[in-house]
Image (cartoon, helix red, strand yellow):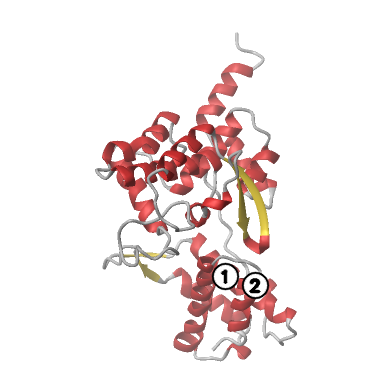
Amino acid sequence: MLPNLDKFLLNLKENNFSSETVYNYERDLNTFANFLVKEINIEFDKIDKNSIVLFKKYLSSTSRRTASKELASKQLSDYSINRILSALRSYIRFLIEINYRVPVTADNIKLFKIVRKYNEVPTMDELIQVIEAPNKFEKDPTIALRNRAMLETIFATGIHISELLSLKREDINKSGSICVMIKGKKQRFVYLTPRAIKYISAYLKTRHDDTPFLFIPYRGRNNTDKNKKISTNYLQSKIKRYRELLSINIPISAHSIRHSFATYLAESGANPAAIQILLGHESLETTTRYVHASDRYAEKSHTKYHPLKK
């Protein structure tokens, strides 16, 4: 239904986008293709600005299954809608690059304006409890070591969960720095703490396999495949479970651990430009929100630095 879609997806792969990212682009563009066929019954070459407006309205009223595939459903968030629209914009820009005559331009696709809200950051004590939780709650000592090492690595480096689960043993050098490949064949270095290195080393001592990945699954389908990776859903569900067992009220995920990594670096005085490099953000504006993300730090700064205290 969408012209040159295969070429677009192949171009993403050639530019070193992860298989997960390519899949997300394909899924989002198929959402648009299905809309054209089932909702307004027109071909891609005949769409116009009004078609885009109708698509946005369609997305705003669309329900989707929850991740657990329960019967309950919920509306797409503005973030999810913008992700789909961004995929469509990227696709149209690609068509223009290969000299395909497009019926609308990328500029015709306006994203929703979103008022950013700072996520609440768990306290350091809460973070430590979650990071150490595998040793407390996992019955299998090998799984406890692995899960502890994964959580230590996220907080030590601030990497994305997808980057974490794609790490290979050879990616870590002797000094504890890791070269992470990000979108568009770009690279950045992240750095393990001595504490994280200790737990990774303890975990690797239990390994007697030729699997290249740093963290490997021990259960589930095809877990004996040496190229099999741990799923993001597994780790996210484990973090949620640890938080619940610890009776921590603040939602904690792999992303919020990354968020906390940046926030606590900022609170300790780290330069926002350095945090930008560590997180792999293209824009410093994206990074600087971490400097002000913690209300606790704002209150502490006010108490310490206000010029007219008495």
What residue is shown at x 48% (from left), y 48% (from top)?
255
What residue is shown at x 68% (from left), y 81% (from top)?
95
Which quadrant of the figure contains the N terminus? bottom right
What residue is shown at x 50% (from left), y 28% (from top)?
296
Q: Quick one: which residue is furthest to the left in this view?
A: 139
- Label of residue 243 in the image: none
- The tally of labels here is 2
Which quadrant of the figure contains the C terminus? top right
**Residue 232 drawn at (x, y percent):** 42, 57
**Residue 278 drawn at (x, y percent):** 63, 44
Task: Indicate whether 16 appears above or below 94.
Answer: above
Please tell me whether mark 1 or mark 2 is closer to you in this view.
Answer: 2
Q: Is residue 79 left or right of residue 174?
A: left
Q: Which residue is mark 2?
A: 14
What residue is shown at x 60% (from left), y 17% (from top)?
304
Q: Which residue is mark 1?
A: 85
Disc 1 from disc 2: Cα separation: 22 Å
Task: Indicate whether 54 appears above or below 264.
Answer: below
